Image (tube, rainbow, N blue to C red):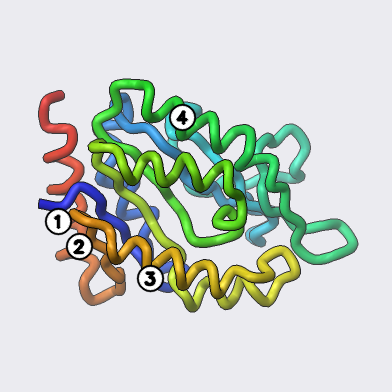
Amino acid sequence: MINKLFLSGTIGAGKSTLIRECLLPYLPVVGGFYVQRILKDGQLIAFRFRPVSADEAYRLSLAVDNLEGLDNLFLYAGQHSGWLRNEQVFIECGVNCLQQSLKKNNKLILLDELGGIELHIPAFMAEVYRIFNSSIPVLGVIKAPANAQILEKAETGRGVIDINRSFIEYVNNLQKTKLINLDHENRDALAVTVRNFVEEACNDL
């Protein structure tokens, strides 16, 4: 019986959308975080760290006119340069989010997603490993190697490929853990797997 289930796959395969669909009825007992995409005029301009408990709407994307007033942006497009990163988001908001997720009586912890720049941040990853070592079921997304290669091309993602590969190997060696690649052909079957996993974790509601 698994108690940690992770999805991987290409960008746009629908990993986070599938997870959101399965989690919506159970949000009061779900801890952890997800990454929100920030869009301007249809273009991706930032990534935002969002604790599940901080957003009842659980919006995977948010359309804006500008970035003013938005907190916890850990990757964002600079005005006159490429992508910029803010590691303090993981050190402050991220660490606190994961610590609180363990302290509360959550039935399940969401980690959506892991495998990018946060792997370079020891304080945040220490809390991730604490969650892995707990008995609380975990559901999440892990950045595929191909996606890590895209991030590596940006200055902000330097060094991601190697550490992403090592992290995936670590996850694959965890007990009671399954990492599944999502594609358009297996989405319906995988939706059943994810839904059953969520329901079993939260079945005493």
- For the residue pair 31 and 170, the one nearer the viewer reads as 170
In the picture as drawn, the residue positioned furthest to the right comes out as 80
Disc 2 crowd, CA 10 A, few/some/many (<14, 14-19, 20+): some
Query: Which residue, given by chain and number where applicable, does mark 2 sit on?
Result: 190
- Closer to viewer: mark 4 or mark 3: 4
Sequence-first disc among 4 and 3: 3
Residue at the image point whose x is 15% and y is 56% from the top = 193
Please give left or right for residue 94 compared with residue 199 in the image: right
Disc 3 crowd, CA 10 A, few/some/many (<14, 14-19, 20+): many
Secondary structure at numbered mark 2 = helix
Quarter of image, res 71: top right
Sequence-first disc among 4 and 1: 4
- Closer to viewer: mark 4 or mark 1: 4
Separation (CA) of disc 4 from disc 3: 28 Å
The answer to whether the residue labelled 4 contacts the one labelled 1, judged by CB atoms less than 8 Å apart, is no
- Closer to viewer: mark 3 or mark 1: 3
The answer to whether the residue labelled 2 contacts the one labelled 1, judged by CB atoms less than 8 Å apart, is yes
Quadrant, the C terminus: top left
Query: What amino acid does circle 4 point to?
Result: Gln
Query: Which residue, given by chain and number where applicable, does mark 1 sit on?
Result: 192
**How many numbered badges does the structure rendering display?**
4
Query: What amino acid does circle 2 point to?
Result: Leu
Separation (CA) of disc 4 from disc 1: 30 Å
Q: Position of residue 57 (x, y in %)?
A: 44, 33
Q: Is residue 84 above or below residue 57?
A: below
Query: Which residue, given by chain and number where applicable, does mark 3 sit on?
Result: 9
